[in-house]
Image: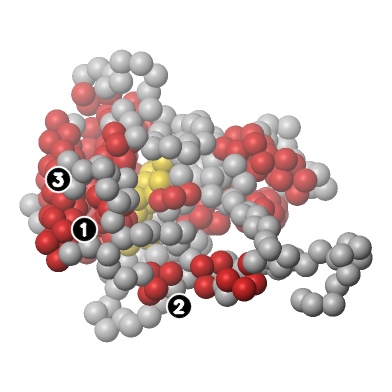
Amino acid sequence: MDGFDASEGVIMMAATNRPDILDLALLRPGRFDRQIVVPLPDLEERLPILAVHCKDIRLSPEVNLELVARGTPGLSGADLANLVNEAALHAVRRNSAVIEMLDFEAARDRELMGQRRESTVLSEQEKERVAYHEAGHAVLAYVLADADPLHKVTILPTGMALGVTQQLPMEERHIYSKKVIEDRLAVRMGGRVAELLIYGDLSTGASNDLQGNTELAKKMVKEWGFSSRLGPMAWGNESPAFLGDELMHSRDFSEATGTVIDEEIARILQEQEDRAFDLLSQHKGGLVAVTGELLKRETISGEEVGKLVDEAFGGPVHTGQAALVPHFTPQGGSLTPPNDDTVAATSRMVFPEPENKTGTV
């Protein structure tokens, strides 16, 4: 980068998703000495992005772009552009002249979870187990006061999932309390616990839930100081998760401390599983009712889950406003079938992977 005169006004720009491996010589003053992080758009930014991509398409007067923006946390600008395009394609398939809210719902689900697996046919026994699994997630998502509001639950196979329970926040969150994290852990345990409560045994369907919970519990112990045994300390020197970043980290704690970390992670997960079991035992009537409705209709909204649980409980579970998120109203049929850190929480029953699988495509 030599040869530029100070008065020429030349600005050098570059982009990378791996700033952790850049040579420090590139970052010294006079070179790439201004660093700008480009995060994913928040709610206030997603709304105008959607408006830009929708200006040349025909929308129904009932379309609420603010509701669409609220239901798409974690999506980038390119994702939102694709969302609008998928909604238009879905409207065309319905032979509709305008795009309705149900088109945005179908497009968002395809963007976040993948395409419906029409070819996947479950036996009646498998379908019932999937329904109980997802009902376990859904009931806990409604019952727990600090859980993200329940949006909908489906047992339609989508992407690599056999069923999905979807929660969406009412507002953007930047800080999470310990209670919120614990409720998220308990909700994810709901599927596994529901199977254990009803069938007395477990299945391979909870692998995705267990992976997400284990990673979240690790952060509670190693990064956020939520362990009383370890105290207010951070372990592992964690940095932004770039591709291959974990390969560069060395262990900065002793074997004894590592043992305590493992024990604390196991304790947190076991406590939340026990908590989920107790709550589902109290609301077993609601669990059975939600399962029955799923087996009949395959997809139900969070509002309907709340009504079923309240009716089985003999009164409202929540003394205040129910923990539900505004949902898109389906027109003329059932709805078609999002990481943790994208705020939208999704619990799913996944296809079991073959034992000899060595990679992911």
Mark 2 and 3 residues: CB-CB less than 8 Å, in contact?
no
Is residue 360 among what the camera can see? yes
Q: Residue furthest left?
A: 200
Quadrant of the rendering where the N terminus is positioned: bottom right
Which residue is at 50% across, 61% downward? 114
Decide if residue 350 is on the left or right side of residue 65. left
Instruction: Give whichever of 50, 327 is nearer the camera.
Output: 50
Q: Amino acid at mark 2?
A: Val
* Mark closest to the chain's N terminus, 2 or 1: 1
Instruction: Give whichever of 70, 238 is nearer the camera.
Output: 238
The residue beneath circle 1 is 125
Q: CA distance from mark 3 to mark 1?
A: 44 Å
Which residue is at 38% across, 74% downward? 247
- Front disc: 3 or 1: 3
Q: CA distance from mark 2 to mark 3?
A: 40 Å
The residue beneath circle 3 is 229
Q: Residue 229 falls in which quadrant of the image? A: top left
Is residue 78 among what the camera can see? no
Q: Residue furthest right?
A: 8
* Mark closest to the chain's N terminus, 3 or 1: 1
The percent position of residue 89, horizontal first and vertical second, equals: 68, 57
The residue beneath circle 2 is 361
The residue tagged with tag 2: helix, strand or loop? loop
* Mark closest to the chain's N terminus, 2 or 3: 3
Instruction: Give whichever of 123, 152 is nearer the camera.
Output: 152
Decide if residue 84 is on the left or right side of residue 322. right
- Front disc: 2 or 1: 2
Quadrant of the rendering where the C terminus is positioned: bottom left
The residue tagged with tag 3: helix, strand or loop? loop
Q: CA distance from mark 2 to mark 1?
A: 30 Å
Mark 2 and 1 residues: CB-CB less than 8 Å, in contact?
no
